[in-house]
Image (cartoon, helix red, strand yellow):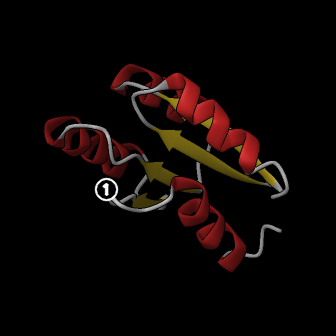
Amino acid sequence: MKKVLLIGIRTTQLAELAQKLRPFRVEIHVATNLEEVSRIFMQEMIEFVFLGFETDFEHRLKTLAHIFTVSPTSEIHIMGYKSDPAAFVASILASAGTE
């Protein structure tokens, strides 16, 4: 089972997104800040990272730098401002054969 990390600033939106991804064969983790991201990467081998559009630029840069340092093999996907998060993540997971 592939492990997925959803990163955003709103816990409720991350929970809703995680629910929409239930049909996929993935283990979902969520984080709202860099400390949570660090903790998750210390405990898990994350294969897919999805960084939400609502995070500010500095937070994105710090988060990306950290992920590249601790897990250079993770696939990182950054959602755009106009993308539908559920459709965006689902299309990538489907192309990875996790259905």
**Residue 82 image point, x, y percent:** 35, 61
Examine the rendering and report whether any part of residue 44 can be seen. no
Viewport quadrant of the N terminus: bottom right
Q: Which type of secondary structure does the marked residue at label 1 adopt?
A: loop
Q: Which residue is mark 1?
A: 81
The residue at the point 64 percent across, 31 percent down is 15
Instruction: Give, as a three-letter code, the residue at label 1.
Output: Tyr
**Residue 16 image point, x, y percent:** 65, 36
- The residue lying furthest to the bottom in this view is 95
**Circle 1: is it few (<14), some (14-19), or many (20+) Cα within 10 Å?**
few
The residue at the point 24 percent across, 46 percent down is 65
**Residue 74 image point, x, y percent:** 49, 58
Q: Is residue 25 left or right of residue 77?
A: right
Q: Nearer the viewer, residue 87 or 99?
A: 87
| Res. 86 image quadrant | bottom right
User: In the image, is residue 56 above or below residue 69?
Assistant: above
- The residue lying furthest to the left in this view is 58
Examine the rendering and report whether any part of residue 98 can be seen. yes
The residue at the point 43 percent across, 26 percent down is 32
User: In the image, is residue 34 above or below residue 65?
Assistant: above
The residue at the point 43 percent across, 59 percent down is 76
